[in-house]
Image: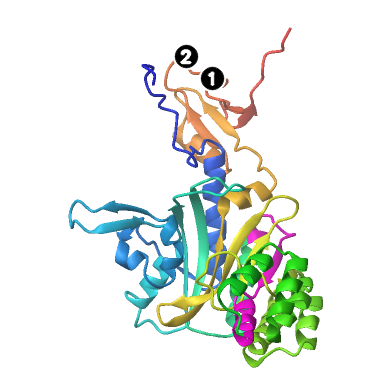
C-alpha cells in the first residue's frame, strides 16, 4: 500500500489513450473503409454499446459470452452486456428491426468493442472494428463478395499486398463425425490439429481409422489455394466433407473473378477463432509482421444464412505507411476569416492566435499566414 495519490494517467490493463495524430489517422481510415462499403451498397447501422444480456448473447453472441463485460441496469434491474463483437448485434438488428426489408440485406458498421481479456500477442481489450454483413443468400458468390469488398477497402487505404487465408472450420468435425471419433480420442485429435502436430495427428488418426485417416494429408495441404484444392479434389471425402470442399472451390473461383490479383491460401483443417462460423471462414493478413487485418466468414444471423467480414482499424494503421502530418497554419490576430477559410479549403489546418504570447512554434504550426493570405513555412531560428 502507498499514500501516494493515484496517477490520473494510469489506465486499466489493455486500455489506452489514442493521442494526436494517431486518433485522427484512425478516424480518417475508418471513414475510407466505410465509404468503400457504401459504394458496394452496404448501408450503415449503429448498434448501442450496451444491450440486455439475454439478447446480446443469443445466437452467434454466445460465442463471445466469456469475453463480455456484464453490469446491472439501474433502471430496469436487468443484466446488461457491453459488446465484445459487433456481428451479433447486426444479426439482431437484421432479425428484428429490419426483418421485413427484402433480402439480400447489406449492412455495415464501425465502432469500438470491449473484451474481458486480450491475448498474449494482442493485449488490447478495447478494439476498433469496421465491417460488413451480407444477410440472406447462402452462396459462394455472397462469400466471395464480402472477401473482395474487404480487400478493396484495404487497398483504398494503401494496403495493396494483403493475402486472404480461407479456412473450413466444419471440415475437421465432419470427418471426425464420419469416423465416429468421440470423447477423449476426439479431444486429442482436435488438440493435435490445433497445434499443427503432424506426428500426433497421424498417430491418433491411425488409431481412429475411417475418415480420420484423411486428416494427415489434409493437414499437409495447407498453403496456396490451388494446391490445397487439388488435394481436396483428389481425396475420397465422405458426402458432408465433399460438400464443404466443393463450396470452398466455388468460393475461391468467385473471389478470383472479383479480385484477380488477391493472394489466396487455404487451410482445410484450421478451426480456431470465433466458433459461430458455419461455413468458410476468412482471415486477411498484411505483409510482414502486421498480423491479422480482418476476419470473417459464414454464420447464422438468427435463422438466416449470413456472411461477413470485420476489419481491425488499429491493425490496419500499423500496416499502412505513416501519413504525412497535416500542415498547420498560424493565423495572427486580426487575420481575415475569408483568407483562413481559403487555406482550410486547400487542406491546411488553421490555428488562431488567441493571446499575444501565442507563437507559431508554441502552437506547433508548420506555416504562417502572411498579409496576402498565403501560407509561408515557419522560419525556425538557427541553432548556434
- Confirm whether residue 319 shows in the render: yes
Instruction: Write down the quadrant of residue 36 in the picture.
Output: bottom right
Q: Quick check: 355 left or right of 100?
A: right
Residue situated in front as seen by the camera: 124 or 23: 124
Residue situated in front as seen by the camera: 246 or 335: 246
Residue situated in front as seen by the camera: 204 or 40: 204
Gap in angstroms between the C-alphas marked 1 and 2: 9 Å
In this view, 148 is above or below 371: below
Display colour scheme = rainbow
x, y percentage for residue 183? Answer: 55, 74
Identify the disc placed on residue 362: 1
Which residue range is magenta in the image? 154-179
Q: Quick check: 383 left or right of 24?
A: right
x, y percentage for residue 321? Answer: 70, 46
Q: Are marks 1 and 2 in contact (CB under 8 Å)?
A: yes
Residue situated in front as seen by the camera: 109 or 210: 210
Residue at x-position 62% and y-position 73%: 185
Q: Which residue is mark 2?
A: 357
Amino acid at each position: 500500500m502507498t499514500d501516494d495519490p493515484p496517477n490520473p494517467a494510469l489506465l486499466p490493463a489493455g486500455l489506452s489513450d489514442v493521442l494526436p495524430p494517431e486518433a485522427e489517422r484512425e478516424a480518417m481510415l475508418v471513414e475510407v473503409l466505410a465509404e468503400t462499403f457504401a459504394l458496394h451498397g452496404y448501408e450503415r447501422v449503429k448498434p448501442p454499446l450496451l444491450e440486455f444480456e439475454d439478447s446480446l448473447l443469443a445466437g452467434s453472441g454466445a460465442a463471445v459470452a466469456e469475453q463480455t463485460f456484464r453490469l446491472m441496469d439501474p433502471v430496469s434491474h436487468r443484466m446488461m452486456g457491453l459488446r465484445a463483437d459487433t456481428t451479433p448485434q447486426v444479426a439482431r438488428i437484421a432479425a428484428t428491426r429490419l426483418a421485413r426489408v427484402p433480402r439480400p440485406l447489406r449492412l455495415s458498421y464501425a465502432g469500438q468493442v470491449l473484451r474481458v481479456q486480450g491475448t498474449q500477442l494482442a493485449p488490447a481489450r478495447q478494439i476498433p472494428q469496421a465491417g460488413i454483413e451480407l444477410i440472406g443468400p447462402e452462396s459462394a458468390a455472397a462469400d466471395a463478395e464480402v472477401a473482395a469488398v474487404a480487400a478493396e477497402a484495404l487497398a483504398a487505404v494503401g494496403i495493396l499486398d494483403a493475402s486472404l487465408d480461407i479456412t473450413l472450420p466444419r471440415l475437421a468435425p465432419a470427418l471426425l463425425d464420419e469416423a465416429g471419433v468421440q470423447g477423449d480420442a476426439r479431444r486429442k485429435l482436435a488438440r493435435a490439429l490445433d497445434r499443427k502436430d503432424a506426428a500426433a495427428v497421424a498417430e491418433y488418426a491411425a488409431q481412429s481409422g475411417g475418415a480420420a485417416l484423411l486428416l494427415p494429408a489434409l493437414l499437409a495441404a495447407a498453403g496456396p489455394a490451388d494446391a490445397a484444392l487439388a488435394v481436396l479434389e483428389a481425396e475420397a471425402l465422405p458426402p458432408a466433407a465433399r460438400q464443404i470442399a466443393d463450396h470452398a472451390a466455388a468460393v475461391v473461383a468467385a473471389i478470383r473473378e472479383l479480385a484477380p490479383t488477391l493472394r489466396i491460401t487455404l487451410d482445410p483443417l484450421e478451426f480456431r477463432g470465433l466458433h459461430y462460423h458455419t461455413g468458410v471462414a476468412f482471415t486477411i493478413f498484411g505483409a510482414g509482421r502486421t498480423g491479422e487485418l480482418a476476419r470473417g466468414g459464414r454464420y447464422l444471423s438468427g435463422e438466416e444464412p449470413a456472411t461477413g467480414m470485420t476489419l481491425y482499424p488499429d491493425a490496419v494503421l500499423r500496416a499502412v505507411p505513416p501519413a504525412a502530418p497535416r500542415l498547420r497554419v498560424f493565423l495572427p490576430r486580426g487575420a481575415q476569416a475569408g483568407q483562413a477559410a481559403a487555406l482550410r479549403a486547400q487542406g491546411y489546418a488553421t490555428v488562431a492566435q488567441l493571446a499575444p504570447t501565442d507563437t507559431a512554434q508554441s502552437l506547433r504550426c508548420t506555416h504562417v499566414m502572411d498579409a496576402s493570405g498565403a501560407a509561408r513555412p515557419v522560419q525556425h531560428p538557427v541553432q548556434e
